[in-house]
Amino acid sequence: MRNIVSPPPERRNILSSYTSPETLRDRSNWYIKLRWIAILIAGIFVFSGSHILNLHLHLTYLTWTLGLLLIFNIGYFLTNKKRRALDRIVELGILKFQMVMDLFFLTILMHLTGGVENPFSFFYFIHVVISSIIFKGKEVYQIAFLAIILFSLEVLGVQFGLLNHFHILSSSEHLHDPVYIYMALSVFCFVILFTAFLASNVTSRYRVIRDELIHKQKQLIVADQAKLDFFRYVAHEMKSPIVTIQSALDTVLSLYKESLNEKADDLLSRSRDRSQQVLDTVKDIVDMTQGTDEKPLQFAPCNVSLLIQNIRESLLDEYAIKQPNIDLRIPDDFEMKTYPELLDKIISNLLSNAIRYSDDNCQVILELIKNSHEMELIIVDFGIGISENEIPMIFDDFYRTAKAREKEKIGTGLGLAIVKRFIDKLGGSIFVNSTLNEGTTFTVKLPIHE
Ligand code: ATP
Ligand code: MG
């Protein structure tokens, strides 16, 4: 049995730190994609600004800058493609380098397109938001401060005449007004720091919730496995004592039947039936947990025709008193790759239901149709049928219809739940068509693996 223990407190920290070099690489690839789009949009703006809006743009410098940015992005792209993500520090370093270089490029582009007079300074905010998605905590503020420093250097450099001013509009006297400049810079600093705070806060909250969910999901998987382990353990431990009790009862009933009085005979017979019921449940639990233990199921070639014939023989033995008529309409020696244990359980359960819920000497038909990519198994009976409102419930664990309980005392209601689970495992589907008192048809479709 596996123990479910709550994680140590440091677990949360481990979860919230940068997950893996691969995750950072994914972020880097995403960032490169964003840069392709940004370059394209900047190109369109430059072209339309100069040719349509007749802005005074220095096309040569701008083309050089955008061209250089394009070359850098090709470089990042090729580096990521060639190298596998190996180290978290290296990946983080590459991302930081890209982010810093982008801020430099953005400042050059801003400078060439009017600096403070260009409304596109909000691109700095986009940068800060992107950095909060890529990085955590202090790196976001580092990027925000770098943006403030670069933008302020550009604006003050122009203001103090250290840098050329590239006008994009003809009249821009207010740009030389120090009050306007300092106001614009203060608003810029405030908004960018506020953006950094807000964006890193939102993304860190999102990360905590996401980590919590991942952790809970892992706990659920462990709990589910523990439940299956427990079922398997109980089923295993119960099986042999029940078989022993049953064979002892069988022996007493067959050897001493004549000497038993009526009451004792009745008691022993009922005990025998009850033990059979428990044994059926135990067998169902074993089936339900099939393939979940350390020993995985074997995917192997299977002669489906032979498998069906063998099932027919054993069901004829099991239901000898009922004398059913099992009519097989199947191709000879049809082979396919599958999990034979699962296929066996699916067909046995459906065929035994068809016999169980029909009268003595009933007729049951099993047809196998082989299509190009899937096989269809159609099981038809003319028994008690299922009412329309009960059909959706029959695949639920432990569900038995009232009519079925009346006809057959013994039954756990797990057979179809197991069938459905196995069909899902094989990638197939199951359909039911039934009319009360007329009969039932189950159609199973399973993919064919050659
Ligand atoms: P067991 O777990 O032993 O197979 P069961 O046969 O009652 O018990 P399922 O095989 O899961 O359980 O079937 C669920 C219910 O669906 C049955 O109890 C019955 O009411 C209904 N059912 C299934 N197959 C048929 C059928 N061929 N005809 C009529 N009712 C059916
Ligand atoms: Mg059944």
Image (tube, rainbow, N blue to C red):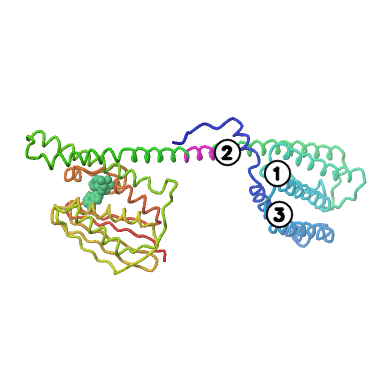
Upstream in sequence: badge 3 or badge 1: 3
Task: Tell me where residue 134 sits by quadrant.
Answer: top right
Q: Are marks 1 and 2 in contact (CB under 8 Å)?
A: no
Upstream in sequence: badge 3 or badge 2: 3
Q: Is residue 313 left or right of residue 129?
A: left
Is 137 situated above or below 367?
A: above
- Check disc 1 and report its element: helix, strand or loop: helix
Is 306 situated above or below 117?
A: below
Q: Position of residue 405 (x, y in %)?
A: 20, 43
* Front tag of 1 and 2: 2
Q: Residue at x 45, y 46 (%)?
A: 294
Please tell me which residue lies in front, 241 or 124.
241
Residue 388 seen anywhere in this rendered image of the structure: no
Return the residue at label 1. 131
Q: Residue at x 80, y 36 (%)?
A: 186
Does the beta carbon of the residue at mark 1 sit less than 8 Å from ligand 1? Answer: no
Task: Give the magenta-colored segment's residue range.
Answer: 213-221
**Hey, what amino acid is under mark 1?**
Ser
Q: How dense is the environment of label 2, judged by Cα within 10 Å: few (below 14), some, or many (20 and up)?
A: some
Count of numbered marks: 3
Prevalent SS, magenta region = helix
Quadrant of the frame with the N terminus: top left
Q: Position of residue 396 (x, y in %)?
A: 32, 44
* Residue 318 within the magenta-colored segment of the rendering: no
**Hey, what amino acid is under mark 2?**
Asp
Q: Position of residue 24 (x, y in %)?
A: 66, 47
Q: Are marks 3 and 2 in contact (CB under 8 Å)?
A: no
Residue 381 seen anywhere in this rendered image of the structure: yes
Return the residue at label 3. 35
Query: Hey, which residue is sitting farthest front in the picture?
Result: 255
Return the residue at label 2. 211
